[in-house]
Amino acid sequence: MLKFLRQYSRSWVIAVAIGAIVVVFIFWGIGGFRSPRFEEAATVNGVPILMSRYLQQYNQLLRQYQEMGRGELREEDLKALGLKDRALEILIQEELLRQGARALGLVVTDEELREHIKGLDIFHEDGRFSQRRYLAALSRARLNPADFEEQERLRLLSQRLIQLLTAFAKVSDAELREILRLGKEEVEVRYLALSPERFQAQQKPTEEEVAAYYRDHAQEFRTPERVRVRYLLFTPQAFLAQATVSDRELADYLAEHAAEFTRPQVIKVREILLAAPPQPDKRRQVEQKAQGLLRQAKEGADFASLARSHSEDAAARAKGGEVPPVKRGERDPAWEKVAFALAPGQVGLAQTAKGFHLIRLEEVLETEKLPEAQAREQASSRLRQEKSRALAQEAARQARLDVIAGDFAEAAKRLRLTVKETPLFALGDALPGEEMTRVFKETALALKPQEVSRVVETPPGFVVMQALEKRPAATPPLEEVREQVRQAVARQKAKAQAEKEAEQLLARLRQGEPLAKVAAQAGVPLQESGPFTRAQGFLRQPLAESLTTAAFLLTEKNPYPDTPFFFRDAYYLLAFKARRLPPAEELKKEEEKLREQLLENKRQLLFDAWLTQERRRAVIKVRELPV
């Protein structure tokens, strides 16, 4: 539940998605607001949650999903999302939090709330709180001061409650050392991969085997539901000319998003240098190596370990790739173009006269404001994109109504749009075009013939579609799929043979025969995994959990597991090669960061337990909800 409470600890914009309770306008002194008793959506220990508040919360969640690209939601969509229950659960948790804080004597005074809001940079102009900026920002977010102030009060209250409930959470040095060991320890294995494919051609299934397999596995050959649709695509780009931005809009946007219009000035990075010779063929080889390391880093390989193994900068290599902080203008322009464009944690590849540089941005130490002209250009572009997107969405909504009321082709002609049409497709089929997302395909498959869809957002724009043809899922007779069934039987028999062969090879290894000899006689390449951690997984495959677990159980005295492991169409035989812990100084650097993460996990558990207990003890009555 800390994640729930952290919604109150982010920027004021997040408050829009959480909802609010209309209370006293303490900030502007407008006075108290008291109303007659409204119909209740629920009560928590006798305290009512008004239906008006519930509807407000529900509508906010609904807007969230629509703005996330889901377009107009049908009744079945709303049921699947469970927005009714989610909206009410948010309000119940808020009330439990208030009551729990009150019972513990925790309060946030009006003066504390006032000073907190005045301190929020988003409402500042020239370094001071601006009432105009405050009201304009809240108005743009469709939130009044009372709503926002109540949410900020609850956020501050939640922070104090969390601090009180979790003050005694501690992480021992022993816990820390063990977690570090489990997280940082690396193991390296040799392995043989025995694929059933090598035995496939040997299999000759009989007609009896084919018929029996089809009888027992007919569902494997069932053709899925398929649909063919036509559709109209409304791209924001097409409406860009209509999306104008006034000077006032631009000024307000720049003021409200000032922190976004900055660029890194000083950065902290890790770097792997691969020196490249001038000869083109040798340079290409180095580039291929750099691309391979880049791929490993992006897939989760520890960058510091890669640097220690591959960097040709001796000083940086000894420090896991660490280099002194870099100020803009100090390095090669090609290097800076890549490095200063990265976000913390991202990895990029730059090419300079020295060679190839793999760069991982660790931290932005200092920033500077963008030049005014550049900031205005970026802000104007963002605003125009937002407006053009809204125009495209509205045009799609209007077109949908036109299509429902009339002819699809005629509506397209009036709108000067090209009607696009798909072939018959199933959910898992690949289709050309950026718009063919999973949401597009799910929406299409849910349509009845001639039915017009809701507006669907896709990467290039908004789509309105109509189903032209639909074929239900069906199981074809054996005669139509005989060859497919025959191949399935052959694969099954080949897998059984591969498993038997793998078990025999492993038995020879466990009896003491040399690994290289067994591999050579079996005609199977002997491969090496390279070092990997538990988090990275065997061959950088997080899903290969059984192989990863088995590898970390191996030792010099017990170099082989008890059984082969099947993963992604091959049987694997593992053999221990090496085990390694990072140097003590590297572990030391990680201690404080990890200690805070473990402490946060304990706080999470403690708060979850408290909230669960409060909910069990509470008397909660829920009325019939109207939506």
Image: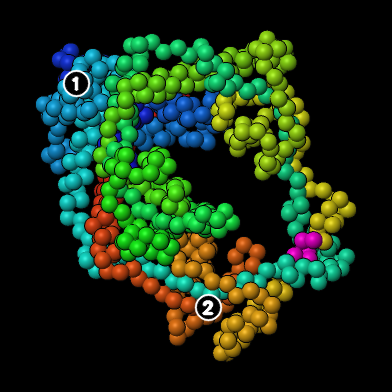
Q: Is residue 569 above or below residue 556?
A: above
Horizontal placement of 399 versus 257: left or right?
A: right
Residue type, label 2: Ala
Mark 2 element type: strand
Q: Quadrant of residue 458?
A: top right
Q: At which x and y percent is residue 323?
A: 31, 54
Q: Amino acid at mark 1?
A: Asp
Q: Quadrant of the N terminus?
A: top left
Q: Residue furthest front?
A: 278
User: Start and end of the magenta stretch?
Assistant: 487-492
Quadrant of the image occupied by residue 23 = top left
Residue 355 in percent (x, y) is at: 45, 53
Tell me which label, 1 or 2, sits earlier in the chain: 1
Which residue is pictured at 38% across the width and 54% down the height?
Answer: 271
Q: Which mark is residue 477?
A: none
Query: Disc 1 versus disc 2: distance between alpha carbons?
Result: 66 Å
The residue beneath circle 1 is 126
- From the viewer's side, name the closer residue of 35 and 442: 442
Q: What is the secondary structure assignment of the residue under circle 1?
A: loop
Residue 25 vs residue 422, the one in the foreground: 422
- Left or right: residue 486 compared with residue 164: right
Residue under label 2, please give it. 575
In the image, taking residue 42 as reference, residue 288 lies left or right, namely right
In the foreground, 25 or 88 = 25
Q: Is residue 265 above or below residue 36?
A: below
Q: Is residue 572 visible?
A: yes
